């Protein structure tokens, strides 16, 4: 095995292998493995910065798998906000189990009573927040991770001990003349990306199922998919963070994507209800021109040749992504450490559209 070079980026140690530490592995399917050679070389040359792994599966079989860092296939990779999509899966399972009344259930009727009792900025509109509002990033509180001035920006949440109470205490969002009101927006929702809301959804699910979130996830979702030893992050008060940071192997991410590509079925069993999969992958909110939003799934509009495809996507900081290419019955997983790069999601999209989709 040849030695490989590591590079330091903005004080953060990242290892970018230029010698292909792990050999690619393939299974017989429609795609030609040799077509991915150019993608391998481009990543090794640093064209897409610090890509750590790529996995492409078609028709349920891996056609390309390559690791570009020293950690290899068994590394639990920080999924960042791709974790949010898993929270949506757990919500669907809690509803299926009869523990959660449905998407219209009011969250403060489920959370511990102290959440409402000690709430700052009380308001009947906050009392009416529903599970679906958290699934679609469209609750009435002022929370926007893309606005540094927002009171609900996630960086402010991390500074305090009780992350769920942080969300509960937020004031109601104002809608000045230049901001569309929910009633005037597509799907009747005002989308604002809010990690604190998904963090709170984690406690809603945990409260509903009467089981620690990480244990419920293992029993109802991960064990049926043979996903072992996930590395959860926790709030200072010990709540598993549904909003980001879950460590999973690249193949684990593929299994989760494949589960939804196959309508909620895995290993011959219906793991997640097909109706929940359909609802999750249907437009529920308008996020931006290039994407709608389902139940904690991005519905990315990706130009491919002379047409645009809609690719349901699990996405996290740095460009970490799981793409469902439904017309090709394919799943593409890309993990990175491009956390401090400019427009890291664009790097991932270029890798997907310029190198990986053409190979399929």
Image (spheres, rainbow, N blue to C red):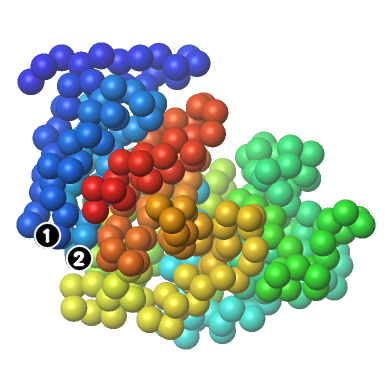
The picture quadrant where one finds residue 106 is bottom right
SS at mark 1 in the image: loop
Q: Residue furthest front?
A: 306
Residue 220, position as x, y percentages in the image = 34, 71
Residue 215 or residue 55, whichever sits in front: 55
Residue 184, position as x, y percentages in the image = 80, 70
Question: Residue at the location (24% across, 72% down)?
Answer: 266
Q: Would you place residue 81 above or below residue 311 in this image?
A: above
Residue 170, position as x, y percentages in the image = 78, 54
Q: Which residue is mark 2?
A: 59
Instruction: Say whether marks 1 and 2 touch (CB < 8 Å).
Output: yes
> Few, some or many C-alpha atoms within 10 Å of disc 1 (few <14, some 14-19, many ≥20)?
some
Task: Tell which circle, 1 or 2, labels the residue nearer the N-terminal end.
Answer: 1
Q: Is residue 357 visible?
A: yes
Dividing the image into 4 quarters, which one contains the N terminus?
top left
Q: Is residue 139 visible?
A: no
Q: Would you place residue 122 above or below residue 63 in this image?
A: below
Residue 140 or residue 2, whichever sits in front: 2
SS at mark 2 in the image: loop
Question: Residue at the location (18% across, 47% down)?
Answer: 64
Question: Residue at the location (44% across, 35% down)?
Answer: 347
Left or right: 28, with 190 as reference point? left
Across the whole image, how many numbered discs are drawn on residues?
2
The picture quadrant where one finds residue 342 is top right
Residue 69 or residue 360, whichever sits in front: 360
Question: Residue at the location (34% across, 66% down)?
Answer: 326
Q: Which residue is mark 1?
A: 29
Q: CA distance from mark 1 to mark 2?
A: 7 Å
């Amino acid at each position: 095995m040849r030695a490989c070079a590591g590079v330091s980026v903005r004080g953060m140690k990242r290892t970018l292998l230029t010698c292909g530490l792990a050999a690619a592995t393939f299974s017989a399917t429609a795609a030609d493995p040799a077509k991915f050679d150019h993608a391998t070389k481009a990543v090794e040359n640093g064209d897409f910065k610090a890509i750590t792994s790529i996995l492409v599966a078609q028709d349920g079989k891996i056609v390309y798998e390559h690791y570009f860092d020293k950690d290899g296939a068994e590394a639990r990779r920080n999924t960042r906000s791709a974790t949010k999509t898993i929270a949506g899966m757990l919500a669907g399972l809690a509803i299926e189990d009869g523990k959660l009344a449905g998407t219209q259930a009011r969250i403060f009727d489920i959370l511990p009573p102290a959440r409402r009792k000690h709430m700052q900025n009380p308001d009947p509109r906050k009392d009416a927040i529903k599970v679906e509002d958290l699934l679609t990033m469209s609750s009435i509180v002022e929370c926007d991770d893309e606005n540094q001035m927002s009171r609900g920006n996630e960086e402010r949440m991390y500074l305090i001990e009780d992350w769920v109470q942080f969300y509960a205490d937020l004031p109601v969002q104002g809608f000045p003349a230049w901001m569309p009101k929910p009633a005037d927006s597509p799907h009747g929702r005002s989308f604002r990306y809010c990690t604190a809301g998904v963090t709170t959804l984690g406690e809603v699910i945990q409260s509903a199922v009467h089981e620690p979130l990480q244990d419920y996830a293992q029993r109802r979702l991960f064990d049926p998919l043979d996903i072992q030893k996930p590395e959860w992050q926790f709030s200072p008060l010990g709540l598993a963070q549904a909003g980001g940071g879950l460590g999973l192997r690249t193949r684990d991410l593929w299994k989760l994507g494949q589960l939804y590509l196959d309508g909620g079925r895995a290993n011959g069993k219906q793991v997640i209800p097909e109706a929940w999969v359909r609802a999750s992958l249907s437009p529920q909110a308008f996020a931006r021109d290039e994407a709608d939003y389902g139940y904690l799934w991005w519905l990315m509009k990706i130009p491919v040749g002379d047409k645009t495809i809609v690719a349901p996507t699990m996405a996290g900081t740095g460009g970490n992504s799981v793409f469902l290419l439904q017309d090709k019955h394919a799943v593409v997983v890309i993990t990175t450490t491009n956390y401090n790069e400019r427009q890291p999601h664009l790097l991932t999209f270029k890798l997907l559209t310029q190198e990986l989709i053409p190979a399929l």
